Amino acid sequence: MRRRVALCALLVAGALPARAQTHLVIVSGLGGEPRFTQEFAQLSESLATAAAKRFAIPDSDIVWLGEDAATRAPHFAGQSTKENVERVVTRLAARAGSGDQIVIVLVGHGSGEREDSKLSMPGVDLTARDFAQLLAKFPTQKVAFVDLSSASGDMLPLLAAPNRVIITATKSSFERNESHFGQFFVDALTKDVADTDKDGRVSLLEAFRYAAAETKRLYDDDSRLQTEHAQLDDMGAKAGVGDPDGHSGQGVLARRFFLDGAFVTQAGANDPRLAALYKDKNTLEEQIDQLKTKKASMDSTAYDDALEQLLVRLARTAKTIREAEGRKS
């Protein structure tokens, strides 16, 4: 009994996590032809702008490296050469705090297989092997690596690890045709289209699911065979899935990964009490997710007791939020 009580106290009364600072690095590669060059630049600039304006990431924590070194746009920091990418990421690793969020987004054309899977860049290309070495610089941070390039699927097994969200636009390197997933993924973060749980925020899981659904819809509407199948792995399983539910197994980490890194919704932005309630709600949901991962190793009674206490607290917090917002349900 004492063991169960101690476990419940640990799970329920744990300190609330502080705001996690997000650091965003966008790398757009070679277009190969004008329309792709323009598209990759537009997607990258839109994402960088949204990061600053919608998610309140400081300008100093948003870096965009792209094809045209002469680009004059906010957050653009130079050409996307191997040397520049490695320099930016290495500097970031030196200053990022423990528990911060690192988000790296690739936009462009991909090629190669397995550890030689790569993004087409000015000069020498960065491979999956190179990116694995770069991500290893963040052992205490929560990492999201989002590869929106074609033929990106082979990146996932090489980069997947605990405390990382790995997203690729395709299932394997053999899906080499033009990818549309990237456009929809950026839309999810830059437009009001993907907030399925209506909490005023868009998680990486919501962005992934929206983009995957819209990609399928595009091919269905055109009566074409779908040639790209996005994948997500946030368990370190090194095997992605195309339909993570975020409640058991794949997608749990992505469901709690927000670019703003905070626990404040749009509704609570100007109401400190409401903001605190949403922070409590998010914390309880994270604790429930963590508890579920330990179910197999726990005494069944202890697990049920701990889960019940967390669910009761979550229900009460959700009810208080609804009342504070003047909602009935």
Image (tube, rainbow, N blue to C red):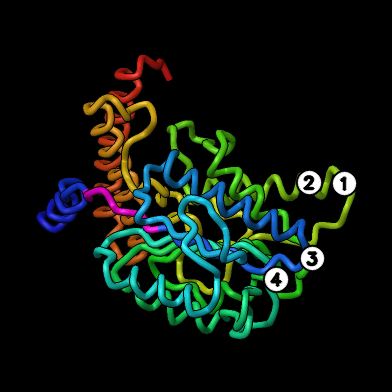
Mark 2 touches mark 1? (CB < 8 Å): yes
**What residue would you read off at disc 3?**
177
Mark 3 touches mark 1? (CB < 8 Å): no
Could you tell me which quadrant the C terminus lies in?
A: top left
Q: How far apart are marks 3 and 4 (CA)?
A: 8 Å
> Is residue 22 on the magenta stretch?
yes
Q: Farthest residue toward the right?
A: 223
Pick the front one: 17 or 179: 179
**What residue would you read off at disc 1?**
222
Q: Earlier in the sequence, mark 4 or mark 2?
A: 4
Q: Which of marks 4 and 1 is nearer the N terminus?
A: 4
Q: Is mark 4 on a helix, strand or loop?
A: loop
Could you tell me which quadrant the N terminus lies in?
A: bottom left
User: In which quarter of the view is residue 194 placed?
Assistant: top right
Three-letter residue code for mark 1: Asp
Q: Earlier in the sequence, mark 3 or mark 4?
A: 4
Q: Is mark 1 on a helix, strand or loop?
A: loop
Residue 60: horizontal and vertical position, in percent?
Answer: 35, 55
How busy is the neighbourhood of tag 2: few (under 14 within 10 Å), some, or many (20 plus)?
Answer: some
Q: Farthest residue toward the left?
A: 2
Q: Is residue 147 visible?
A: no
**What residue would you read off at disc 2?**
218
Tag count in the figure? Answer: 4
Q: Is residue 112 visible?
A: yes
**What residue would you read off at disc 4?**
151
> Nearer the viewer's eye, disc 3 or disc 1?
3
Q: Which residue is drawn at 35% across and 60% down?
A: 295
Q: Distance between the residues labelled 2 and 3?
A: 14 Å
Mark 4 touches mark 2? (CB < 8 Å): no
Range of magenta residues: 17-23
